[in-house]
Amino acid sequence: MPEPIEITLLGTGSAIPTPKRSHSSVLFHTGREYMLFDCGEGTQVQLQKAGISPLKITRIFITHWHADHFAGLLPLIETLHLEKRTEPLEIYGPDASRFVDAILELSYWGVGFDIKAKNVKAGEKIFSNEQFEISTVKTKHSVPSVGYCFKEKDHWHIDIKKALKRGLSGQKLSEIKEKGKIRNILLKSVAKMTPGRKILYSGDTLISMDLFKAAKNADILIHDGTGLKNMERKSHASAKDVARLSKKYKVKKLILTHLSKKYKTNNEILKVVKPIYKNTVVAYDLMKVKL
């Protein structure tokens, strides 16, 4: 059985936070992995409210280097240092080495664990393990930026009766799952494949067709929903366009986040976008989604 995936939207506000909406940060938890996507101001406080130790964080993915998406890194790193972290921490992002080096130079004494800055660009696979892989997707913002695609690997479920009829048992079952074929027996002849789950996070962006093509049939798309109108000058998409394209590309659930402080309630946005695409929700701080 695949591991559960839990997503916590730690911060759902835009450039200016409010008492109800903190700066952008999303936590993905599956298996032993606790991954932050963006780390705006106040992220470590939001982690405490969510009951999640910052020491559990395994890696951080920054979409772009505007302060509301990374200003929480400095205090978070200091907290990890004070809590005696020893495990290395990987931080991914466009120009990551430039910004991570600058943050570390602000410390008199350095930190007691290794921080590895990983520079990324759009359209590449940047992390993979036995369970899932993460790749970057092209977005359109006013500074270098990427979105991130979390793609779980497909699962094969062996039909024991079919396998036994073909003389497969014990170690041979693991072997055919790993290799896809034993002798002249194909895996698909004795097993059923379940596609892995797919989740995308946009960060800040105008409409990017690369992002929506990558999000086709995705289980969840977490997208910039700053306003209902297109904000070309500030490089934010219209939430109405995001809803329309999410429907077109058969996204199973659209979550709008990075919301402008001018909206006092989620319903102000929902009443406009829900008729466009019914599978839309508007995020709020500490909202949890489980798959």
Image (spheres, rainbow, N blue to C red):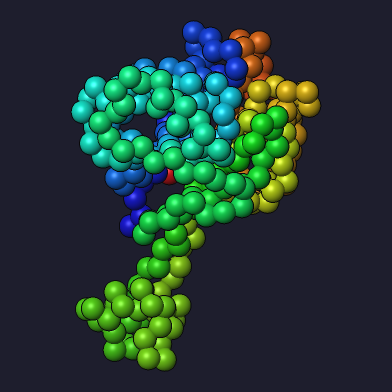
- When the figure is inspected, residue 218 is found, relative to residue 7, above or below; the finding is below
Percent x, y for residue 154? 45, 62
Which of these two is toward me, 121 or 282? 121
Q: Residue placed at 36% from the left, 21% from the top?
A: 107
Residue 172 is at least partly visible in this image? yes
Q: Is residue 244 left or right of residue 254?
A: right
Q: Is residue 177 left or right of residue 264?
A: left
The quarter of the picture where residue 75 lies is top left
- When the figure is inspected, residue 79 is found, relative to residue 132, above or below; the finding is above
Q: Residue placed at 51% from the left, 15% from the top?
A: 21
Which of these two is toward me, 249 or 103? 103
Residue 280 is at least partly visible in this image? no
* Residue most extreme to the top: 19
- When the figure is inspected, residue 134 is found, relative to residue 72, above or below; the finding is below
Q: Residue placed at 29% from the left, 45% from the top?
A: 32
Q: Is residue 113 left or right of residue 115?
A: left
**How many badges with numbers are in the image?**
0
Which of these two is toward me, 157 or 214? 214
Percent x, y for residue 22? 49, 17
Q: Which quadrant is home to the C terminus?
A: top left
Percent x, y for residue 68? 54, 21
Percent x, y for residue 17? 54, 13
The quarter of the picture where residue 33 lies is top left
* Residue most extreme to the bottom: 184
Q: Is residue 261 left or right of residue 109?
A: right
Q: Residue placed at 78% from the left, 26% from the top?
A: 232
- When the figure is inspected, residue 268 is found, relative to residue 134, above or below; the finding is above
Q: Which quadrant is home to the N terminus?
A: bottom left
